[in-house]
Amino acid sequence: MGTAISLTSAVALVGRFPVLAGVDLSIPQGSVTTILGANGAGKTSLLRLLAGLQRLDGGNAMVLACDLSQPGRGFRRRVGLLGHDPGLYEDLTAEENLAFAMRAVRLPATHVGQALARCGIQDRLLKTPVRSLSQGQRRRVGLAKLVARRPELWLLDEPHASLDEATRVLVGELVEEAATAGATVVATSHEPEYSVPMADLVVTMGGGIVTASCRGGRHVS
């Protein structure tokens, strides 16, 4: 098993403020990592760095064998980020949102229907504008975008937040399916009761650095 993510003294700034103040982190390919920490610890900034959306201002960062100081064309196509806002177009249906997302990264829409069904978006919900969907249904559509794209790296920002129990279970199932298929998953969380059992590695952040790490509760036979 290779290394999917390798950060050494990684620094990222917003203005002059260091949102990441020297992160050291190594994550194996095909593993699940949960990142814990209080608000302002640097969790979301770390995900944005790994997605190529936050500039690396110091140190070294390799993600999927790409140097984040110059990630190159096509890097973002290999990475899927699901934030607090699933990034959906309100006037488009779930089907239309996924088809557009696939075109945006120049991938075929082959798996759109299957991905939506896997995430419980079926029948009338397929043709319903996103503005009329509940928060949980929107989160399911956002998850379906990742399932359809099949990225090598899944980045999930608080994936269990404000969800009903059925959707929280779905998140865990999708994470396990992605990792079993060889993808690497990194998720931030304020809910360790859900996120720690699904993880191989649990990392705690504070002040923009990694302060502790330990094994999670995921067991692969």
Image: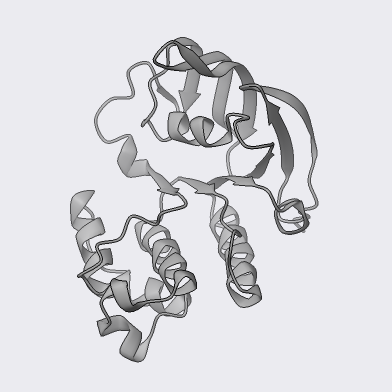
Query: Residue at left 30%, top 60%?
Result: 88
Query: Residue at left 37%, top 30%?
Result: 52
Q: Position of residue 169 (x, y in %)?
A: 64, 70
Quadrant in the picture for the C terminus: bottom right
Quadrant in the picture for the N terminus: top right
The scheme the figure's colours follow is one colour
Q: Position of residue 160 (x, y in %)?
A: 61, 60
Q: Is residue 64 visible?
A: no
Vertical order, 207 against 178 (above or below): above
Most foreground residue, 53 or 220: 53
Left or right, 47 with respect to 37, comes to: left
Most foreground residue, 37 or 210: 37
Most foreground residue, 149 or 3: 149
Vertical order, 23 against 197 (above or below): above
Q: Position of residue 34 (x, y in %)?
A: 67, 44
Query: Residue at left 32%, top 78%?
Result: 132
Left or right, 140 with respect to 208, comes to: left
Quarter of the image for residue 38 reads top right
Q: Position of residue 75 (x, y in %)?
A: 32, 34
Residue placed farthest to the bottom in the image?
Answer: 123
Query: Residue at left 58%, top 53%?
Result: 179
Vertical order, 112 against 121 (above or below): above
Left or right, 62 with respect to 28, comes to: left
